[in-house]
Amino acid sequence: KTQNMKRSVVLLAETAAAEAFTVGKTVPAVNMHFGFPPALVNMQERTAAKKTIIVGMPGAFTPTCHSVHVPSYLENQDALKERGIDEVFVYCVNDGAVMTAWAKDQGTEGSMVTFLGDPKLEFTSAIDLVLDQPAVMDVLGNKRCKRFAMYVEDSVVKVLNVNAAGPDDLEPTLAPGMMKSIDALQK
């Protein structure tokens, strides 16, 4: 009987791990790092009772993330606010010190964009968006986050756009692409 119970627990764990993170799921109650030394930010709590966008990127200061991705959100703040977005979270698999330096470099102070770090890959793993392709790891060094953007209402994912084709297909994860996806929900 004990053996059957252990087997059932293992099967339940394997089933839960196999379930993909997708639209309709609740943002996991996983802590991200803000600042340095880091303050912990529970993502489920931070996305509760508001409309947010969570943007995951492969690396702070990397060319595409730095010159295209983040600026798209900073330049479209008014249009995002018109759609009821309260806050945009940008994060990478980096520590809080790196993310703080990058936020300063990008001029996010006073904006609706908050930079967070996921140094142990905990949030990225919980949402099943780990980027672990050998070619990427050869350049960036360790496992990272796939490029994605998700629209969240009261901690529930309403849109999840994942960049599957590399840096040539950024549109769905940039601010205009997310606004298009959010607008489609209203129709």
Image: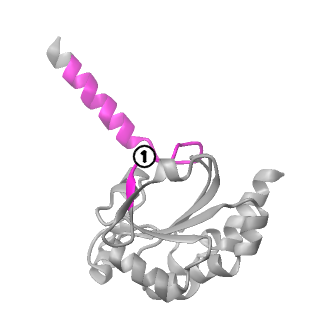
Q: Quadrant of residue 141?
A: bottom left
Along the line of sight, the residue nearer the viewer: 13 or 74: 74
Please tell me which residue lies in front, 78 or 70: 78
In this rendering, the answer to whether 18 lies above or below 63 is: above
Instruction: Decide if residue 101 is on the left or right side of residue 37.
Output: right
x, y percentage for residue 154?
61, 46
Residue 90 as seen in the image, left or right of residue 79: left
Q: Residue at x 29, y 73 (%)?
A: 134
Is any atom of residue 45 visible in this view?
yes
- Please tell me whether mark 1 sits on a helix, a strand or a loop: loop
Q: Measuring 59% from the left and 76% from the top, which residue is drawn there?
A: 170
Read off the residue under disc 1: 29
Report if residue 59 is visible in the image: no
Q: Is residue 112 positioned above or below 72 on the image?
A: above
Q: Position of residue 41 (x, y in %)?
A: 42, 57
Q: For the N terminus, which image quadrant? A: top left
Instruction: Say which amino acid is labelled 1.
Output: Ala
Number of residues whose C-alpha sits closer than 10 Å to that of mark 1, classed few (under 14), some (14–19) or many (20 or more): some
Question: Residue lying furthest right in this view?
Answer: 187
Q: Is residue 132 left or right of residue 107?
A: left
Residue 174: % across, % down: 62, 73
Which residue shows up at 58% across the image and 85% down it? 68
Bounds of the magenta span? 5-32
Q: Residue at x 55, y 79 (%)?
A: 109
